[in-house]
Image (cartoon, rainbow, N blue to C red):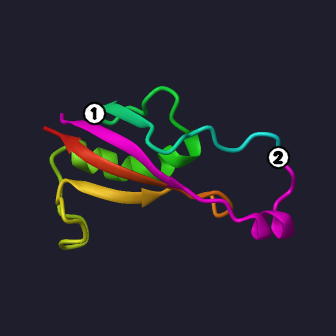
Amino acid sequence: MKKIKITVMRKARYDDLIEKYENPIEHACDLQEGQEFICEGWQKPEGFCDSAWESVSPFVMTLAHGGENFYDGWMKNPKSAMIFCNDGFRPVSFYIEVLE
């Protein structure tokens, strides 16, 4: 199984949506832009957000098992994907790539 690197590329925050729709929460996201995680196969790396893992894990699993070229040429690097977590108030963009 291939090793996969996940890099936190960008974090966004939509304060207008948070104010209008979200109940106050004490703790949201600890991830930092530029932070990297290495996946040994399909296992969630230590310290990686559980909610974000639900969004990225299918792509990690596919790449770890040798899959590539998602959506017929979507990415310049066919052994990669750019995926957002599923938090509509604080989306985080992840670049997922195979380590050769």
Residues at marks 1 and 2, CA–CA distance in whole angstroms = 33 Å
Magenta segment: 1-25
Identified by mark 1, the residue type is Gly
Please identify the quadrant where the C terminus is shown.
top left
Q: Residue 91: percent from the left, percent from the top?
A: 58, 58
- Return the x and y of residue 42 as percentages of the image width and height: 33, 36
Q: Nearer the viewer, residue 61 or 75?
A: 75
Residue at the location (23% across, 48% down)? 63
Relative to the observer, which residue lies in front, 40 or 100?
100
- Labelled disc at residue 78: none
Coordinates of residue 51 in the picture (x, y in percent): 58, 46
Name the residue that disc number 2 marks: 25
Question: In this rendering, would 81 be left or right of 36?
Answer: left
Disc 1 crowd rating (10 Å Cα; few below 14, some 14-19, many 20+) is: some
Residue 67 vs residue 34, the one in the foreground:
34
Q: Residues within 10 Å of mark 2 (few under 14, many from 20)?
A: few
Front: mark 1 or 2: 2
Say left or right for 53 vs 2: right
Is disc 2 placed on a helix, strand or loop?
Answer: loop
Q: Which mark is residue 41?
A: 1
On screen, residue 34 above or below 69: above
